[in-house]
Amino acid sequence: MKKQLTFCAAALIAFAMTGCQKTGTIEGDVLDAFTGKALEMPTVWFDSTIYSTLKEKYKFKQELRKGHFKFENVPVGTYKAIAGRSKYIKTRNTITTTEENPNLTVNFYIYSDQVDPGLYTGSEEGPKKIQNEWVIWSTQCDASVAGYRMEFPQQDGSAKIPGKEDKKAKKGAPKMIPLPAPRVIDGGKLDVFYRNASSVTTPLVAKTYPAVEGDVAAHADCKGFDAAEKKGLFVDKDKATDLKVTYIAENLFKITGDLPKGKQIIQFSQDGKTLQTYYFENK
């Protein structure tokens, strides 16, 4: 009798340990990061678990054709979720359900592996690149953060003779091309994507600074100016504004924030080193 009671007690304890673990449903859509449109037949799985759309017994394969995934009877807890598709860059996200909220609806964003590094806006047609027109005018700065040359010599070193455009250009002093005007952001609301060139193990940082003209001699840490150049465009370090950086997918980030009035130099950096700068203006 005593042995029978002991066995029953152990069974009740085992039932309590398993029966009390709440489960729920985790579902959502896999979308193109730039268009916001659902992607047909994505792959979704939770790392080191049985939950995967690739499982032979996965029940919702028809829904996958609409970009929708669904996992049922998922014990509450924290999971490393991964979503991807052929010829797309994956996303990795940490998701959590609780006893109070065992069900979760979440969207994952991925993007084409043909997207080059740089700055983009999204659209129904896909990513639209913001060309970095100012890159050849940029200089490498340390303490000064960032700087631009006010003009840059034409690469072939030739200058046209007025009235003789049909003749070969006369060799001589190179034609100087001024720094292109900044890209205007009406209303100052920045909402763009930044595709990093390589994987990052430390956070990507985005800041915007007022662009101010200054003496090159006062910015000796900026490399790239010619000896004869007196003026350049630099940042006002004391008036930095942090921009919000949101992870979207591997090497892809959403950059949002309010640009202060006037001309701005936007800096993307990692480990204190500038990756790229852009010249914008909020009118």
Image (cartoon, rainbow, N blue to C red):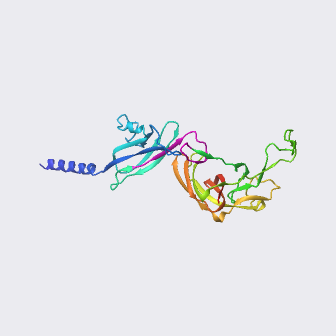
The furthest residue to the front: 163
Q: Which residue is drawn at 51% across and 49% down?
A: 248
Task: State the residue in front, 276 or 163.
Answer: 163
Determine which quarter of the picture holds residue 242: bottom right
Figure check: 150 above or below 43: below
Task: State the residue in front, 7 or 97.
Answer: 97
Q: Residue at x 24, y 49 (%)?
A: 15
- Is any atom of residue 37 visible in this view? yes
The question of residue 55 being in magenta is answered with: no
Task: State the residue in front, 45 or 131.
Answer: 131
The furthest residue to the bottom: 238
Q: Tell me where residue 50 appears, x and y as whole percent.
A: 37, 41
Query: Which image quarter is the C terminus in?
Result: bottom right
| Left or right of 150, for residue 98 | left
> Magenta segment range?
105-126
| Left or right of 2, for residue 14 | right
Q: Tell me where residue 210 appears, x and y as whole percent.
A: 66, 61
The furthest residue to the top: 56
Task: State the residue in front, 254 or 63.
Answer: 63
Q: Tell me where residue 201 appears, x and y as whole percent.
A: 55, 50
Badge count: 0
| Left or right of 95, for residue 35 | right
The furthest residue to the left: 1
Q: Tell me where residue 239 appears, x and y as whole percent.
A: 64, 65
Determine which quarter of the picture holds residue 158: top right
| Left or right of 102, for residue 185 | right
- Is any atom of residue 243 visible in this view? no
The question of residue 120 being in magenta is answered with: yes
